[in-house]
């Protein structure tokens, strides 16, 4: 068996889906869940996602050979601090956080001697829903998981985490922390910020009820990600602040130029931007 | 029969879907298509969307009791000018253009005595695809169609156009031209401009191939509308220029404030915007 005892700290959409996928693949012996809310954890047991739970992270990781930290980014440091002194000698720790530089900084600060056993990770899969009730075993199938090992990371730990994700049907890729944070700022964090900002602009308008009444299919798809968990996205904005501010700056510069072109009836400019965007979208997401 | 002879000028996604829906409802006798490209029109005949075609708009409208102008906004004026002198006495003219003030101005300038027989319209339904091959009879089912009649518009003509759309399964609503253009700028035109602008920002980056490789489900949904026809959206930007510039201005102001909040670690502000947006999205599109 790949993992004898798996501890999932944060049994929500991602942690719950990972537990389900590993159980389905017979890749795990026992799954222990950890969270703050007993009702959630009880529900996770009833759904068969975890076998038992402990609300104390230090207790939850006892004798676990694999620990997956799947809590919001802002609370990862406190989890590291809480579990450090109770880890078994052969334990491997990984996380699923949407930004990696801050998690690595948290690990350096709080994991002490266990730093080489920590494998920073991020599955590029999710929905706008949260909580264990929204979890499902297929979430990671044919999706990518990015690992961003450090110089000091034990290659054996990387290999085991990689195998774990492969068992869920995902494709595992390695890249640097900085590169991860830049790529994700562009493809995930920026779209979420724009969707939230757009919906908020409309929601503040006096005629908002009337306005949303005429929102058709395109709007629904475009704004779906604005239904994501605000706390999680708040954490991501602060955790990946620098990369996000940089891509927001590029976006704002480009948008300002497009606004000027619309003001000045610059047909050529507008047509060029729209055509280039359509070609890129059709080519890469078609 | 509601319509004896229907002339569709512009047999694309919208014109083709309307013809299909009316045929399915047995609401139309003969359907004549008009366009510039004979291959498209021939395909429309083969698909059973139209019964015959004429590439000359003046010929196509001969003895038609209903004329639907479904060409890009930038070419509507030329169609009005071309058909005006060949309209039958009882003809009703309507359009499907995504912005209404410019179409009304075109009608005032080019339709002469027929202005009271012109009913400005806009179905709030569509996909990111174009052309008759993408048309389907169900497109308007349970979608809204907005009519923006003028003071001088013949109420009988409005009633007939309204009945026509009801036959497609749509719900018909009337509002003023100005109100239409403001609401659509917010719910449709702004999202399309943001999607195009975002994809273009990423497409211009040196690592674009690498970036788009990590674009997951959320990104795909968010940018789907950037695959829409660039020409159509170019026309919409110029046709609804004022309302679009106004909502773009509000959006840019709000985005700038959010950027400042991220820069300043203003947790409260970020959380408020994201939560308000999620509530609005869940409430109105949930
Ligand atoms: N959703 C996505 O699309 C997505 C995709 C990739 C990565 N991620 C990352 O995955 C992580 C979790 O996201 P998610 O979508 O799975 O969120 P979620 O569904 O809200 O799950 C988070 C879980 O963490 C628990 N939790 C919160 N604070 C905790 C703490 N201090 N100690 C222990 N447990 C705690 C919560 O349960 P209690 O309330 O009971 O404590 C909750 O069940 C985040 O770091 C996020 O960046 C998310
Ligand atoms: N797509 C949407 O989501 C949507 C939704 C609501 C309203 N609308 C409005 O619907 C109208 C048509 O959009 P669509 O999506 O149906 O576009 P489309 O699929 O590209 O169809 C437009 C058709 O107009 C024809 N055409 C273009 N210029 C012409 C001209 N000068 N004279 C005669 N025919 C001409 C084209 O055929 P030839 O090339 O053969 O001439 C084409 O088949 C636009 O005004 C748009 O604003 C679109």
Image (cartoon, coloured by chain):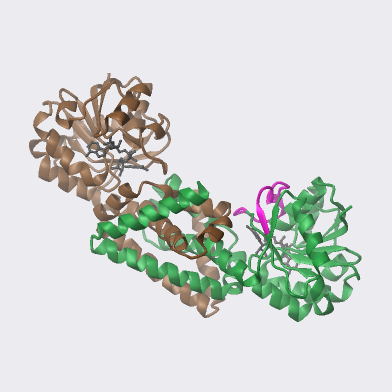
Chain colours: A green, B brown
Residue at x-position 37% and y-position 60%: A206
- Residue nearest the observer in this picture, A165 or A83: A165
Answer whether residue B213 is visible to the viewer in this image.
Answer: yes
Q: Is residue A222 left or right of residue B160?
A: right
Q: Position of residue A112 (x, y in %)?
A: 81, 80
Q: Position of residue B265 (x, y in %)?
A: 55, 78
The segment highlighted magenta reads: A127-145
Residue at x-position 40% and y-position 56%: B196
Using the rendered view, name the quadrant where residue A256 is placed: bottom left
Q: Is residue B64 above or below residue A249?
A: above
Q: Position of residue B270 (x, y in %)?
A: 53, 71
Residue at x-position 44% and y-position 63%: B204
Answer whether residue B284 is visible to the viewer in this image.
Answer: no
- Residue nearest the observer in this picture, B107 or B238: B238
Using the rendered view, name the quadrant where residue B95 is placed: top left
- Residue nearest the observer in this picture, A53 or B24: B24
> Which secondary structure type mostly characterizes the magenta part of the structure?
loop
Q: Is residue A182 left or right of residue A162?
A: left
* Residue A135 forms part of the magenta stretch: yes
Residue at x-position 88% and y-position 71%: A87
């Amino acid at each position: 068996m790949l993992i004898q005892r798996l501890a999932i700290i944060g049994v929500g959409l991602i942690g719950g889906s990972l537990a389900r996928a590993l159980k389905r693949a017979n890749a795990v012996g026992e799954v222990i869940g950890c969270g703050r809310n007993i009702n959630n954890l009880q529900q996770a047991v009833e759904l068969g996602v975890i076998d038992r739970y402990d609300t104390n992270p230090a207790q939850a990781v006892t004798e676990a050979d694999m620990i997956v930290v799947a809590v919001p980014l802002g609370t990862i440091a406190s989890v590291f601090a809480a579990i450090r002194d109770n880890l078994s000698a052969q334990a491997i720790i990984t996380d699923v956080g949407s930004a990696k530089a801050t998690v690595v900084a948290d690990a350096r600060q709080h994991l002490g001697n266990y730093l080489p056993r920590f494998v920073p990770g991020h599955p590029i899969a999710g929905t706008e829903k949260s909580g264990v009730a929204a979890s499902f075993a297929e979430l990671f199938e044919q999706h990518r998981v990015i690992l961003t090992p450090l110089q000091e990371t034990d290659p054996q730990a990387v290999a085991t985490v990689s195998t774990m994700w492969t068992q869920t049907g995902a494709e595992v890729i390695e890249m640097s922390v900085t590169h991860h944070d830049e790529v994700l700022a562009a493809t995930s964090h920026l779209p979420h910020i724009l969707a939230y900002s757009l919906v908020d602009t409309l929601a503040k308008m006096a005629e908002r009820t009337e306005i949303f009444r005429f929102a058709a299919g395109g709007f629904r798809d475009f704004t779906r990600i604005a239904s994501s968990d605000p706390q999680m996205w708040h954490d991501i904005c602060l955790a990946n602040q620098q990369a996000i501010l940089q891509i927001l700056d590029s976006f704002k510069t480009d948008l300002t130029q497009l606004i000027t072109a619309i003001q000045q009836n610059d047909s050529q400019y507008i047509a060029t931007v729209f055509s280039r965007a359509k070609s890129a979208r059709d080519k890469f997401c078609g």
